[in-house]
Image (cartoon, grey):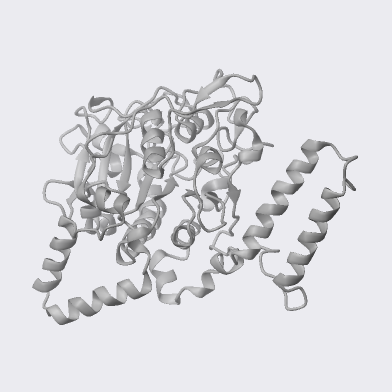
Amino acid sequence: MFSISQSDVARKSGLPLPPSRRELLRVGGLSMLGLSSARLTALRAEQARRNPDTQRRQNSCVFLFLFGGPSQIDLWDMKPAASEEIRGEFQPVSTRVPGIQICEHLPGLARQMDKVCLLRSMQHQMNVHGPACSEIFSGRPYHSAPITDQASPEDWPSLSAMTMRYGHSETGLPPSVVLPWYLQFPGQSLRIAGQTGGRMGERHDAMLVQGSGKGDFQVDGLNWHDSVPLSRIENRKRLLDGLQTADTLKPFPQKLMNDMNRHRDRAYSLLEHRAGEILDLQRESAALRESYGRTSVGQSLLMARRLIEAGVSLVSVNWEDETKIDGANTCWDTHQDNFAKLKNLLCPTFDQAFPAFLQDLDERGLLETTLVVAVGEFGRTPKLGQFTQSSNTRKSGRDHWPHAFTALLAGGGVRGGQVYGSTDRHAAYVSEDPVTPADLSATIMYHLGIDYSQKYISSNQGLPHKLSEGTPIRNLG
């Protein structure tokens, strides 16, 4: 678990937070850049004015899912001493943190490495997309043989659904939001496994906020018109409550009524708390939107920041790019032309959006309480052209590899500028501090204040299950 610090004690007691070591270093760095103490004081005052409740803010998490499985050995766990068929075409470069190197095509991330922990020791045993996604989302081994990518009622509940049920929201907004889409392979009728409430029940599904490919999050029905003000909606709500009290709706099945009431209450709460305004990225400056990149993932991360500011506990962002309709190489899946796709599409998109997001959180005082996690369902084969699961794999590509891959962590008490865990000389197997999907899910729930060991009763079998069988990762702070 994260160690208990002075900041933790102060936060729980309501006392002012002492300045962190990183803040002292940051202030020192600003002084070295020529900013006077008066200017520093003015900057702090402006930050306090914009975010008066920063010190009292509840913990939150943004979970960026790199759908398809990014290549650990080409991006953030490079092995330059290996043979060419292992190390590939890319060269490592130094980052802001001495001793840590990453891919040459991630210069933006390199400049933000002081905020990032490279957790290089993720591992599990599932090499099929859907079941592997399910293992990452739920923190549990897949429940059946990996013969399909599609969701079923037998799925273990996702982290987003568990947070929806057991998380906290002090603002009336849902505690868990997914955007901009639920993952689904083209040609399949159902979502990819593990993204919803599953055996916990679909009523615990997180709220989906859909977005277009360029980040248009216009959601119908969340803004009232002048002709129907909030007072009129409140009158309608009281009228419906009266009808239910009078048993007018008694002939309807109780489950149906409960579902209707739940959806109605959620919709009313969203209207009451002006969710339509929160979801309106036009309220952000054009310059800031450009800094994130006018891509689906860039605008989704900007939306995630707005949702976190508004009090949502967990925002899950599913990676989306134009290759999501490519059944052979969907998003971070690189069975063919691995290096061209990384260099020309995936790295530039990620390297603009993710560092901008970290910087934005930091500048707004949100990074201390917001745990940021970026991870895919697995990594890629150490050897180019190596066959493990997909016949689509070519000599120019890498196949699925769950035995060792990397997660990026930042904020939320995690010390940046560090590497946690390690792999062997080919980034093939974990050699130190292995971390499972269960451990990652337990770490996130622990950060959010959710008892990861508590039990729920499954809706399909009526059996008790823990939220997570994992253990929060130690020594990250």
Q: Is residue 452 left or right of residue 35?
A: right
Q: Quadrant of residue 218?
A: bottom right
Is the C terminus in the top left, top right, bottom left or bottom right quadrant? top left
Q: Is residue 88 left or right of residue 156?
A: left
Residue at image location 64% in from the left, 19% down from the top: 461
Q: Residue 352, relative to residue 155: is it above or below?
A: below
In front here: 211 or 92?
211
Report x, y in % for residue 388.
Answer: 42, 23
Q: Residue 48, relative to residue 109: is it above or below?
A: below
Report x, y in % for residue 57.
Answer: 38, 57
In front here: 246 or 99?
246
Q: Residue 421, relative to residue 300: is it above or below?
A: above
Report x, y in % for residue 137.
Answer: 48, 35
Q: Is residue 443 left or right of residue 213?
A: left
Residue at image location 20% in from the left, 32% down from the top: 83
In front here: 11 or 438?
11
Residue at image location 87% in from the left, 45% down from the top: 247
Report x, y in % for residue 364.
Answer: 34, 66
